Amino acid sequence: MTETIENLRDFNYYKLNTNKHVLVEYIWIDGTGERLRSKTKVYDTVIKSLEDIEWWTYDGSSTDQAITKFSEIYLKPVCMVRDPFRGDPHKFVLCETYKPDRKTPARFNFRWIAEKIMQEANECDPWFGIEQEYFMLKRTGTTHLWPLGWPIGGFPYPQGRYYCSIGERNNFGRALSEAHQRACLYAGLKLSGINSEVAPSQWEFQIGIAHGIEAGDHLWLARYILERLGEEFGIDINYDPKPIQGDWNGTGAHCNFSTNKTRENGGYEYIKEFILPLLEKNHQKMMLLYGLNNEARLTGKHETGQYNSFTWGDGSRGCSIRVPIITKELGKGYLEDRRPAANMDPYLVSSALVDATCLNAKNLINFIEQFAESLKQL
Amino acid sequence: MTETVEHLRDFNYYKLNSDIKQVLAEYIWIDGTGEKMRSKTKVYRDPITKLQDLDWWTFDGSSTEQANTKWSEIYLKPVIYVKDPFRGNPHVLVLCETYLPDKKTPARYNFRSIANEIMEKAKDFKPWFGIEQEYFLLKRTGTTHIWPLGWPTGGFPYPQGRYYCSIGERNNFGRALAEAHLRACLNAGIKIAGINAEVAPSQWEFQIGIAEGIEIGDHLWLARYILERLGEEFGIDINYDPKPILGDWNGSGAHTNYSDIKTRGIGGYQYIINELMPLLQRTHQEVLKLYGSNNEQRLTGNHETSSYDTFSWGDGSRGGSIRVPVITKEQGAGYLEDRRPAANIDPYLVSAVIVDVALLNSTYVNQLKQLLVDSAKQL
């Protein structure tokens, strides 16, 4: 909401250094499972590692994670990075949320599942690369949002010209995307690239190569930074799988995945003979964990596979799984799961992939139950 | 009102700092409304190294509703000074108590004087405080009308639920000001412990603590001063009204967290629920009168408040008068949160009455109530 606040005398409050204090921003996933919240705690000690950060509490009844009568939710610090907005020595700390018994996860805390799964499947050494797509929207009035650069309430030229575009005519919002890249790298996140996407005002950043739990941690922190940057630029960040109806791409979060077996000699055959059948067998179940409203996006058009059927192809972008040409060429490597929507929880998706391919899918039903539990009304 | 002042030649007068050998001391006091602050600058030739270097001063009390024209002088007694984050080193902000010309009788709305007395009496019990000051950010439309920052003028945004600790263009309004305030307070040496966006859109909170005794009032008032001054810079009005917008929108409170050696010691939790809670319940009606004017509008029982007329409490519950945090119950000792005070309280008054009820057998309660009544009387 930066439009109505003017720093009229350009009062540079960022020059006010905080002396011996460290500002720690506690970040958590709220009761929608898709949005992040945060608040600041002032530390007057040196912060060297995660162990220096204490557990905290917040008002869960204000984030749809508790009722007023028993409103306390605990914040358990799990991942700490540098704060690119405030600079050193200040920190961002991603947290898991727990009920007052400190053991029961609060609504939409799925990280604990991922941690358990990654430990169990440690020998498989799963690697991830997630391509997070998103739309940039501009607010017109207080309730209406429309993509940045589009005529208000109307449509620009059809797709075809925007993917990786340059120039005034076709590229909208590069400044924000670039700022995001730099801020994530400053923070120490494993951001590996950016590009403008097929739809106008649609962008993508990639997190990877991330090992195990890192995939979820780094993606959520990158999302946090993106949304905070959106504040600075007056841009709304949108992860809706199908934000605009019509001949416009939806927004996905393709998940690139490999294990030690797919990366070693014979890996390509292993993918075809073991991994793909396992994924096909568990298709319906995994789709339940791949983002709400994903059916609107997986139509079979706009470079998606159909929601209800499992398909794959070498180098094909029209199906559920794409096996990259380079994997076939080298005889080993990774595959790309194109099914997850942009609004998915990376802890759930990474856990599902590892569980299905390394642990015989024995936990999938449990994940689905946990997810359904979080969706219930309080 | 910085909008109409145009900096036409971008004359950066703040660069003139380094050539000034004098020290600018901003004398700050609470005025005759009991809720707003005033200040004026005195130029000192010599460096200020201790409180004693700052002289008593006077001001025109008839212009702040603290005196009548005929006997208008009110004394300013410096009580604490900090670095001035606006002017930078070596300049200072000086918080003052106000006195009638006899230099002994506190002027209207000077509650620090009696609070100090109470804190002195109770100091062996080491009362600690943390106050969560909530406030709204308002933008002026025209000269008289103000409406929350980011709301459609005269209208309403999406309902609450999405704004508490929010991030992003869609849901977070005014972070720049809250952040500037945090830094300015830290820079000044004020005991600010954190900030967060609150439940209502354009509502924020900062926390002052842990402060012992009289410190809580001093630091909170100075933090309020800095916030209002920053509002000038940003063209934003700061509002502490307990219920600024009617309807399904949260009011603004100043929850006061409290502990003493008894609550922090072994068996503290039992002490809180068995001995302290009954004391708080018994004095509920009396004490509420000192917890901010118009607080009845806010304490409705909805929007995470308790009802004005009833005293209630719960472990981890945000719907009662007092919340005992889960961590206090877990550890068997710690602090409690009094959720009754409104955002527009005088922290000297509230901290003094809590200490009085908890440690001094409520001996001062009537005197405090009387002082408030006297301050509110017509001059």
Image: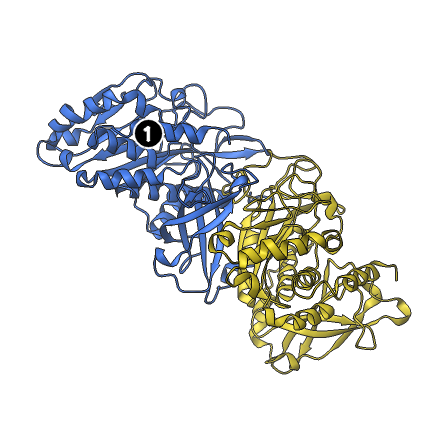
Chain colours: A blue, B yellow
User: Which one is nearer the viewer's eye here, B180 or A27?
Assistant: A27
Residue A297, above or below B114: above
Give, as a three-letter code, the residue at label 1. Answer: Asn
Residue B179, above or below B43: above
Snapshot quadrant of residue A171:
top left
* Tag 1 subunit: A
Percent position of residue A273, x then y = 13, 24
Asked if residue B70 lies left or right of residue A350, the reply is right
Asked if residue A153 lies left or right of residue B138, the reply is left
User: Which one is nearer the viewer's eye here, B292 or A283?
Assistant: B292
The reply to whether residue B92 is in sight is no
Percent position of residue B47, x then y = 60, 81
Residue A57, above or below A356: below
Q: Secondary structure at mark 1?
A: helix
Percent position of residue B78, x then y = 69, 74
Which quarter of the image is occupied by the N terminus of chain A? Answer: top right
Q: Which residue is mark 1?
A: A366
The reply to whether residue B167 is in sight is yes
User: Residue at image x 20%, y 41%?
Assistant: A122
* Disc 1: CA contacts within 10 A as few (<14), some (14-19) or many (>=20): few
Asked if residue A163 lies left or right of residue B129, the reply is left
